[in-house]
Image (tube, rainbow, N blue to C red):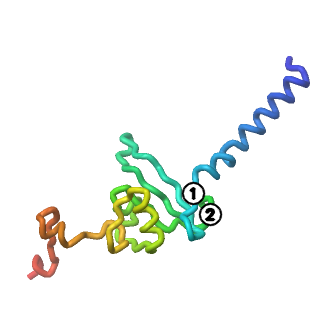
Amino acid sequence: MKSFRQFNTDLERQNAISKLPLVLEHETYKQIPGTKASYRQDAANTNTMTDKHAHVYAKKNGGGQELYSVNFNGKGHDGYSGTPISSSHADYFRSLGYNIPATNVLESLDSSEALAGIHTLMFLEDLVG
C-alpha cells in the first residue's frame, strides 16, 4: 500500500502531466507577424503520404476558425486548393521557404508551366459537341 506521501507525489505528477499539452500547445502554434493569425507547422509524413505543411488559424494559439492549410510546395492542403491568401501571410510563408505562387492563390497554375509542357489545359467546351 502506498503511503500518503507516495500517493500525493503520484497525484502531483499526474496533475503536472495533464497540464503538459497546454504548455506545449503554446510552443506548437506560432503567430504570423503583424497579424492576429497563428499557424501550426506539421512535418512530412511518409506513412500518410503528406508533405511538410502548415495549418493557419484566425486567432493566436490555434484559436478561431482554420483559414487554410498550405503544403511546403505552395499547394493547398486538406482541400484548400484555389484559396487566396493575404499578401502578409504569403510573404511570411515565403520567408520560411514555402513556394507560394506570386498570385497568392494556393495551387494556382502558372501559365509558364503550361507553356513549358508541365501541365495540359483542357477546356470542357472543346470536349462537348
The label number, if any, that marks residue 30 in the structure image: 1
Q: Where 47 falls versus 129 (above or below)?
A: above
Q: Residue furthest front?
A: 95
Q: Residues within 10 Å of mark 2 (few under 14, many from 20)?
A: some
Image position, residue 111 (x, y; %): 20, 73
Looking at the picture, tell me which residue is in the foreground, 111 or 12. Answer: 111
Looking at the picture, tell me which residue is in the foreground, 97 or 49. Answer: 97
Image position, residue 39 (x, y; %): 53, 59
Residue position marked by numbered label 2 in the rendering: 60
- Marks 1 and 2 in Cβ contact (< 8 Å): no
Q: Residue furthest left?
A: 129
Total numbered labels placed on residues in the image: 2
Q: Quadrant of residue 59?
A: bottom right
Q: Amino acid at mark 1?
A: Lys
Residue name at image x 36 percent, y 67 percent: 106
Q: Quadrant of residue 94?
A: bottom left
**Measured Cα–Cα span from mark 1 to mark 2:** 8 Å
Residue name at image x 11 percent, y 76 percent: 127
Q: Where 44 falls versus 117 (above or below)?
A: above
Q: Secondary structure at mark 2?
A: helix
Q: Could you tell which of marks 1 and 2 lies nearer the N-terminus? A: 1
